[in-house]
Amino acid sequence: MKKFNFRKVLDGLTASSPGGSAGGGGAGGGSAHPGGTAGAAGTPREEIQETLTSDYFQICKTVRHGFPYLPTALAFDPVQKILAIGTRTGAIRILGRPGVDCYCQHESGAAVLQLQFLINEGALVSACADDTLHLWNLRQKRPAILHSLKFNRERITYCHLPFQSKWLYVGTERGNTHIVNIESFILSGYVIMWNKAIELSTKTHPGPVVHLSDSPRDEGKLLIGYENGTVVFWDLRSKRADLRAYYDEAIHSVAWHHEGKQFMCSHSDGSLTLWNLKSPNRPFQTTIPHGKIQRDGKKPESCKPILKVEYKTCKNSEPFVIFSGGLSYDKACRRPSLTIMHGKAITVLEMDHPIVDFLTLCETPYPNEFQEPYAVVVLLEKDLIVVDLTQSNFPIFENPYPIDIHESPVTCTEYFADCPPDLIPVLYSVGAKHKKQGYSNKEWPISGGAWNLGAQTYPEIIITGHADGSVKFWDASAITLQMLYKLKTSKVFEKQKSGEGKATAEIVEEDPFAVQMMYWCPESRIFCVAGVSAYVVIYRFSKHEVNTEIASLEVRLQYEVEDIITPEPEIIPQFPDASSQLPSLKSLSGSTNTVACEGMMKDSIPCLSVKTRPVRMPPGYQADLVIQLVWVDGEPPQQITSLAVNSAYGLVAFGNCNGLAVVDFMQKTVLLSMGTLELYGSSDPYQRQPRSPRKSKQFAADNFCMRGLSNFYPDLTKRIRTSYQSLTELSDSPVSLELERCKSPTSDHVNGHCTSPTSQSCSSGKRLSSADVSKANRRGPGRPPFRKAQSAACMEISLPVTTEGYISRRAMLQQLHGISSFSHDERHCTAHTWMNKENRENSFSRSRSSSVSSIDRDSKEAITALYFMESFARKNDSAVSPCLWVGTGLGMVLILSLNLPASDDLRQSEPVMVSPSGTVLTLKGAVLTFACLDCTGTLIHPPYEVWRDPHSADDGEKTRKRKLVMHSPSSSQDMGDHQFAVICSEKQAKVFSLPSQTCLYVHNITETSFLLQADVVTLCNSVCLACFCANGHIMTLSLPSLRPLLDINYLPVTDMRIARTFCFSNEGQALYLSSPTEIQRLTYSQEMCDNLQDMLGDLFTPVETPEAQNRGFLKGLFGGSGQAFDREELFGEATAGKASRSLAQHIPGSGGIEGVRGAAGGVIGDLTRARIALDERGQKLGELDERTASMMASAEAFSKHAHEVMLKYKDKKWYQF
């Protein structure tokens, strides 16, 4: 422990104020004690028995939910009834009954071209774009590759595996067909060369192989389709072509009639041709299903290509012909479609997204029987649907999988593990009432695999916020995901009218309701949403429908640096009294946002209009209050950066880069609305100049952005100033010349007061008026209220890896909120003037550059973390009291005291008072999270109100009275007057002893990177601090000693999506958006890693293969079925020889090893090892038995031979030898 005493002292010193003037004991800035030992008021480290050790932690992925991103291929096992989907990223998703969902990934990352099940064998073959075949073992819960075969000289284009065959046909781009043994994954010497398949007189290459299939009538005949329109019927026994068919148009797919006498081809001109084997010279029938019939009787006009066709027969009805594409060219606006032809009826099913592939599900796996199709699985680019063919109107099945996560782009996530058990059934009951009607009444046909709950039984809920303003609640218990309830936050606002765009200037764009932040209290069921249009909506849960008006408040929160450069020394900014902060409120049924006329300055109007009429609210979450930030002097409100709600106090707090607002949602009043610097009062450690609410629009040209920086950042200030001397083309405007000193090279992309108004105006040749410049320099990170929301998922932007200037989570999240979530198309923004560009480019983004200068650092101190709790607000307080902890982007922590009415009866009438405590604590980097521990190290949860239905029919006194649950420690205990405050920033974590405010422990988490997410979580009845770093490391620290327990480089943050959506939860759970359509869950708990095998579903279950139908004597006699076909004899090495080694390379897989590794550590692992030991023992005993039998046979042969020799020479005389 003595090794890092000196380091702790240094940590405490470096954690003090950058200016070195205000980091003393009271502020806690430089109060780190050597070795983590406590001061007089602190609790010694030895008294806290920390139970968590590194053995409790391990990282592993658990399950992936959602729709496979960029799908490319589809396959179905008709016996096991499981579905496989391949993707462009090399992933495979295998789906069965609900709960059976498996994710696999090719190490190469090459796109999956085709998938083929070994039907009812528990195996899958994948063909990838890197010309490699893989054999996957599905008889284990985590599939693994058994064999791989890499083609070196030819490109794979098509594969076909006949039912119950061990030989895989592989077509290539050169037109050749190779044959692979599935069991050994070795190439056969039997090859069908393209020049042997076509006629000798043909001089052109037929193109790549686009189709392979064996005849249902004779397995010894192979149908080969070439791209240029040639079809060859190849006799595998005689190694020659039985027939060849030619067509003018390119072939896309081929389908057999089950009798094997006819086949159908789809072509690039939108035609279908039906061929008869007896007359292959021309098609038996040619149709263009969607082509217009010409009046003169000529051939119908060409249509779009039919990419795939399936020809399925029915015993008691007409056959089904199902195909994708083929629509007329003159219907350009028509959506992608699937056409079903059943007899003379033609049904066109329009899809919302392009069709990737489709499969027809049939009753029998045998190709030579009536197929009896009952459903069609259609894989779209962003959806998976199954159509019921047994009903004439072709309804779709209700999809049980959570594949609609991306229905609207995901913008934020929250994860709650071990939440109250009654929440899931309640949410499901209100969500079930809004389900769509018109689904098929049949059971979901993809019903394979097996799954059980396993040992994990605690309830889990995931909440996703979306770009369209919707919020989805998901049941995530036992590593499954099921939709519970959907809330549409946009319903509280008026719909945007098309004519409003001009009146509200640039603010009308496509996603004004995108969800930015969420806060949920499971115990009180209060839910709060912050949207990109600078609003907060508070929802209460009710089981009863209500028709009521929506109350709304407007908050003016826009602050700037004053014009004065050097204030008088005796002038000290006073913290305003709470009563003076109560403005003339609009507790209205909607907001009075009168839109300013064009050309006029917008002021005191919100971005959106709350509905003023009574609104019908169904059971579920119902809007209780809407709080909107308003425009100030033509400046749009800033993005909300932090949010906290406490149901016991009845308060909601939110902040942005301008300041903090606290609202009493019970009395619907604003308690506090002020700039960040004014929160400090006289306790500001930086001793900066004050800000105040804007009083005028006058511009101060006195180098306002550099004021006060030279005292704290002299080198950086000098560098920023000198860097501008290299700029050449500057506007000759006096204002522009005055601003030259306070610009930054990236000022157009840095959201400080120093954004440059000249760089754009110079290029456009247009000067800015002084009013425009005034507006520009007051703006700070001003943004229009919303932009096209594309989801964090849709952006893949590399993160900064240097620490030039001020690289931090703040700078990154500025890009997260601004670019990846709400600004996907910034390069298309027009910028005729700097004002226009600044308005649009910086929409909801505090920074476009990878670093934030000290100018921005000083002038805009964002509120980054808020936390309500019962704690000691001031040094040496004797009792805990309600507090609001406020963390800023500069690492400052302020504590505000909340004075609540003494009794609940007075809560609705008496005001809540908010006052400063004078406490300021400091850390390095922006503050991320807070927590409070009692004297034993147990997490103290904030107080909450027990849920009661606000619209219950029982209106008695008992119902109206609030029931509060407080978690503050008892003062009667000897150590009950101590607490530990845990504070984590993007750079370090600190633990303070309260009320002494002594810093007990400091841990510098990272120096070269920064944290993106941190949270205090419970695990194994203890607590720890979980951190996710921008360099991909996941770390856990013990509490309160901040001992490192886990540090694994798990996930390099290569795009903004991961950083935006990563979140921790209790019991060692976490999740993030791994792709725009998928949620990846992981665990950092060793216990869950050990039990994961028991929780996963089984992909393979023992099922008997259905017996083939008896064809009958006459059909067998006259049906012309081929003779028995022995593929082993024809393709085996003895007959066909060996293939060239340079043609393909066999790569052994690790499927068996992976299966054992996956099972290691748990009961399954022990059983697996025991089974392997038994197998090995059995093998040895078998080998011994074989050797014994061989020796006995040898001895018997010798005895027999000796006996024969004896008989031969028995009667001979000696002289006859």
Image: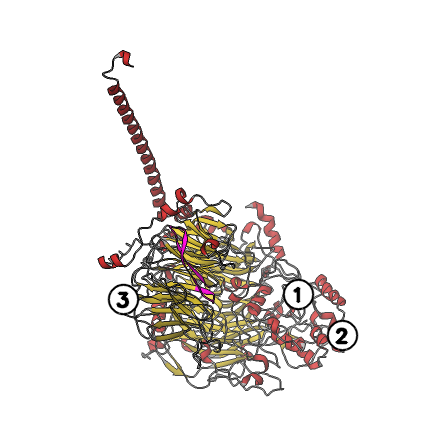
Q: Residue 480, percent across and down? A: 38, 61
Q: Which of these two is toward me, 679 or 157?
A: 157
Q: In the rendered image, which quarter is residue 282 located in?
A: bottom left
Residue at the farthest top position: 1215
Identify which residue is drawn at 37% across, 78% down. Answer: 618
Q: Residue 704, percent across and down? A: 70, 73
Residue 970 in sight: no
Left or right: 806 as drawn, with respect to 225: right
Region in magenta: 229-252
Which of marks 1 and 3 precedes in the sequence? Answer: 3
What is the secondary structure assignment of the residue under circle 1?
loop
Residue holding disc 3: 315
Q: Residue 1030, percent across and down? A: 56, 58
- Coloring scheme of the render? secondary structure
**Label 2 close to label 3 by CB (< 8 Å):** no
- Rounded to the nearest angstrom, the CA distance separating label 2 from label 3 is 87 Å
Q: Amino acid at mark 2?
A: Leu
Label 1: how many Cα within 10 Å (few below 14, some 14–19, many 20+): many
Quadrant (top left, top right, bottom left, bottom right) of the C terminus: top left
Residue holding disc 2: 737
- Is residue 789 shown above or below 923? below
What is the secondary structure assignment of the residue under circle 2?
helix
Numbered badge on residue 853: 1
